[in-house]
Image (cartoon, rainbow, N blue to C red):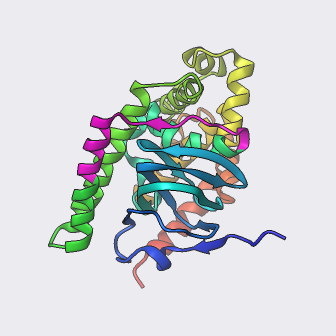
Amino acid sequence: MNNPAHLLTREDLFEDPTLPLQVYIRDPQPEFPLHSHGFDELVIILKGTAMHVIDGQGFPVKSGDVFVIARNHAHQYQEMHGLALSNILFDAKALTMEQWDIRALPGFHALFSLEPAFRTQHNFQSRLQLSDQQLANVNKIIRDLTRETELRNPGYRVMAKGLFMQLAVLLSRCYSDEPTDESIDLLRIGDAIAHIEAHYAEKITLDELAEKSHLSKRHFLRIFHDCIGRSPIDHLMHIRTQKAAELLRHTDRTITDIAFDCGFSDGNYFTRCFRKTTGETPRQYRTGSTTRDRPQ
């Protein structure tokens, strides 16, 4: 019987509980048993080679490779030969990454969400491969980030988050600018997601998204669902509902105005979609948010 993966938590590895980031530079990478974690992990291979085993599938890695390991995926490195890497552990929700304007980059979606999901589902072998110069630029940011988190001078939290954002932008641009034959479909889906997030309040059709992605409607639907776990239109409704929930929490605007501004032309349909996503009506959600946000 295989040994179950040990689950690592933020409390295990994040040295500063007030900062949703932690950097580890492993040179060399030590032997480490099969494990998973309750946060995401950005990995940059600095040198050497290895077999990265994730969810029981092996993927060879080498210097310059960059990839994200999503939470709750069991993994370990085997057959290591001079392997050194940077591990940047991060809590996407605590960093409010869903609000970053970097989400306009298809490479961001491909690197941070689509590729991690697609890899184990479809034995997806492609990943971002940095040139020597790109790897040097990335290393400089990582060194600066490490210094900020270790010294903890006044303002270090803002600096650390800013450096991580800078790193995410650089890597996302690299992913977008240098597609491979395998990654091109993920970038096309990433482009569709970016379009949905930027234009969620407008009328968006399936035909429009498929055409924007340069894919047939059938192929687009299949890949999108494989990556996201729901259809493009369901994802559009999900984004609209998320935006509406934010406005319900933080403004006193009427529910009808919020519905229209988030792309819902019918109040009853808005209520049905909102309840499907949150389990509450918009009015119930607003009342509950007021109670939850009230100082104790």
The vertical placement of 31 against 108, above or below, is below
Relative horizontal placement of residue 160, taking residue 153 as reference (left or right):
right
Q: Which of 244 and 65 lies nearest the eye of the viewer? A: 65
Q: Which of 116 and 290 lies nearest the eye of the viewer? A: 116
Place of residue 179 in the rendered image (x, y in percent of width and height, measured from the top left): 48, 25
Relative horizontal placement of residue 145, taking residue 51 as reference (left or right):
left
* Residue 171 visible in image: yes
Q: In the rendered image, which quarter is residue 122 located in? A: top right
Q: Measuring 84% from the left and 71% from the top, which residue is drawn there?
A: 1
The vertical placement of 259 against 163, above or below, is above
Q: Is residue 127 magenta?
A: yes
Quadrant the C terminus occupies: bottom left
How many numbered tags mark residues here? 0
Place of residue 124 in the rendered image (x, y in percent of width and height, measured from the top left): 65, 37
Q: Which residues are magenta?
A: 121-141
Farthest left residue in view:
154
